[in-house]
């Protein structure tokens, strides 16, 4: 009941009812409503209709006057409750249905501004309770949260730095605008950078009502700039560069040199595969080549192959694309000139080696005869000198043989006889054959048993040659009474043969050249022994001709593992044409 002097003016009351219920009905019509929201909308619509009738002719009706103050205020209270329920339900079901608050109609200057911000920036609103009440589609696209995962939640959940969040909160509650760079946590755990402006809003009583955050994604912008900057550099390189997906080998980018070599256009980026880069692309070899990189065993892989344009060296490592996803980057370098220079050097050396081989063999035989005492007894000093001469003639003859073997491999004159080989048998045979060398150097060769049938298709004599080089190399750098271990283990589609020593390890400065011709690691260890500098080069070429891969792992002060990988049970047809 109202006191007589406070009797309300019915026109004002009716207007208030219309505002509440008609506003509520309109707001619920902005979206496809769930059932409970439709009932609220229906109720508000009925009240809106009643209010219209009252305002149109009820003011002059005795029956309307009979409602009295209580009845009319009940209608007003009901309309207010329905309006509030409708607004809350709209927000709740908007979030649950994955919807977004509709933007202001783009019909006036303010509306156009709001539409532009909503379209091109990341927008979120926090209400007076400190909880998120609205996010736009760009927010979801950038951070990955669905509306029902973030609406009604406190915004500090997405801040990587809680001190920044506290600073933003203090600013806006004091009526200040906060500007700066923020790092937010995406739903998948990524940390993303945003340029952010947070603006507070206050009601007519000066109370904080909400804040609006406007953000632009710096992470994507910076990544795009870096990507484009990198591409500008790559475009000027003479080497071919390919950026592609690790799983599908889909080419994402190829530089100008690559496009020119392959006859591709810039518009074809994204439509080609790495399988299109060679006319005779061998997928199994490519997969074997990439396997250690994809499994995280090494940071970079390298292989030399014959491309349609000539011999090339392919170096591959991981990188990141413009979207931050991992990608593979392969640099393909023409090595034809380098190979020509190496062949010329090798040919000149091999010519001399041919001339040296026969007299060296004769000298070695004579020294052995003297050392055996067949031509008479030698005193201790003479025997010592003869022994030194014999060992050096062995070393010189080994160098000559290595040079001639490498020259045959490079010229394609070496022949292979492929057959099914059990790698465990090869390791046992190699350990037995080199036991005397181990005794001379004070090193033990130990074969670790393999419980599986480790079969490959290969030339057993060439594998023995590889093992001989790796074992002698390991023995040279293993301290006296040390152990060199030979093992084979399964690595998915291929077998890995390992020769492990306990030497000083390979220094960083030598790792990139370890397989180069005539390269030797400088080592200060007293027990290290010199080699020819060709053994690892020969090993690499033989394994590559078996469509395999050879590499190493090393730790300074602990030792080195040289290993080679061969495909399981894959028949090989090796011959002169393959060696070429």
Image (cartoon, rainbow, N blue to C red):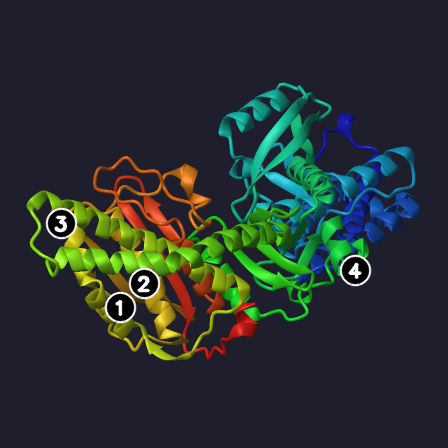
Along the horizontal axis of the image, is 321 left or right of 507?
right
Q: Give the image quarter of residue 416.
A: bottom left
Q: Say whether marks 1 and 2 touch (CB < 8 Å).
A: yes
Q: Residues within 10 Å of mark 1 (few under 14, many from 20)?
A: many
**Residue 118 x, y percent position in the rendering:** 77, 41
In this orientation, does residue 90 appear? yes
Q: Earlier in the sequence, mark 2 or mark 3?
A: 2
The residue that label 1 is drawn on is 427
Query: Disc 4 on helix, strand or loop?
Result: loop
The tag on residue 481 is 3
Return the residue at label 4.
Answer: 263
Q: Nearer the viewer, mark 4 or mark 3?
A: 3
State the residue in front, 45 or 332. 332
The outermost residue toward the front is 375
| Vertical arrangement, residue 48 with respect to residue 464, above or below | above
* Residue at mark 2: 467
Looking at the rendered image, the disc whose residue lies closer to the viewer, 4 or 1, is 1
**Mark 2 against mark 4, which lies toward the viewer?**
2
Quadrant in the picture for the N terminus: top right
- Label 4 crowd (10 A; few <14 / some 14-19 / many >=20): few
Q: Which comes sooner in the sequence, label 1 or label 3?
A: 1
């Amino acid at each position: 009941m109202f006191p007589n002097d406070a009797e309300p003016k019915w026109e004002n009351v009716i207007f208030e009812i219309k505002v509440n219920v008609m506003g509520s009905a309109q707001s619920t019509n902005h979206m496809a409503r769930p059932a409970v929201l439709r009932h609220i909308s229906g109720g508000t619509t009925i009240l809106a209709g009643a209010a219209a009738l009252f305002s149109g002719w009820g003011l002059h009706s005795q029956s309307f006057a009979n409602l009295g103050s209580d009845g009319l205020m009940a209608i007003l209270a009901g309309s207010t409750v329905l309006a509030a329920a409708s607004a809350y339900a709209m927000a709740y079901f908007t979030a649950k249905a994955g919807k977004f608050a509709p933007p202001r109609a783009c019909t006036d200057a303010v509306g156009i501004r709001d539409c532009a911000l909503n379209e091109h920036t990341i927008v979120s609103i926090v209400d007076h309770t400190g909880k998120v009440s609205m996010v736009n589609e760009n927010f979801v696209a950038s951070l990955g949260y669905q509306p029902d995962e973030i609406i009604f939640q406190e915004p500090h959940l997405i801040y990587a730095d809680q001190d920044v969040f506290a600073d933003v909160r203090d600013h806006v509650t004091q009526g200040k605008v906060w500007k700066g760079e923020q790092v937010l946590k995406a739903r998948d755990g990524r940390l993303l950078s945003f340029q952010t402006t947070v603006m507070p809003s206050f009601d007519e009583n000066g109370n904080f009502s909400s804040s609006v955050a406007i953000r632009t994604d710096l992470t994507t912008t910076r990544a795009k700039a870096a990507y484009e900057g990198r591409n500008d550099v790559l475009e000027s390189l003479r080497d071919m560069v390919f950026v592609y997906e690790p799983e599908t080998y889909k080419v994402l980018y190829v530089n100008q040199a690559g496009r020119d070599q392959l006859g591709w256009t810039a518009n074809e980026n994204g439509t080609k595969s790495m399988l299109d880069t060679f006319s005779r692309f061998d997928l199994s070899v490519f997969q074997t080549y990439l396997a250690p990189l994809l499994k995280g065993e090494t940071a970079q892989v390298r292989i030399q192959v014959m491309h349609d344009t000539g011999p090339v060296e392919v170096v591959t490592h991981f990188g990141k694309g413009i979207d931050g996803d991992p990608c593979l980057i392969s640099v393909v370098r023409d090595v034809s000139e380098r190979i020509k220079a190496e062949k010329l050097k090798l040919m000149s050396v091999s010519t001399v080696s041919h001339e040296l081989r026969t007299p060296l063999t004769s000298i070695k035989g004579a020294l052995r005869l003297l050392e055996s005492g067949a031509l008479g007894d030698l005193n201790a000093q003479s025997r010592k000198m003869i022994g030194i001469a014999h060992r050096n003639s062995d070393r010189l003859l080994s160098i000559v043989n290595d040079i001639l073997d490498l020259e045959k491999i490079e010229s394609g004159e070496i022949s292979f006889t492929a057959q099914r080989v059990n790698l465990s048998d090869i390791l046992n045979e190699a350990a037995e054959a080199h036991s005397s060398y181990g005794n001379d150097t004070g090193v033990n060769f130990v074969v670790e048993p393999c419980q599986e049938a480790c079969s490959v298709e290969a030339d057993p004599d060439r594998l023995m040659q590889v093992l001989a080089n790796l074992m002698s190399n390991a023995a040279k750098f293993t301290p006296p009474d040390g152990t060199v271990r030979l093992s084979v283990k399964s690595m998915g589609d291929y077998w890995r043969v390992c020769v492990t020593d306990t030497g000083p390890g390979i220094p960083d400065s030598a790792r990139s050249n370890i397989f180069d011709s005539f390269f030797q690691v400088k080592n200060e260890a007293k027990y290290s022994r010199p080699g020819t500098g060709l053994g690892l080069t020969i090993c690499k070429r033989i394994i590559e001709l078996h469509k395999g891969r050879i590499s190493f792992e090393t730790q300074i002060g602990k030792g080195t593992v040289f290993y080679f990988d061969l495909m399981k049970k894959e028949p090989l047809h090796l011959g002169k044409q393959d060696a070429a």
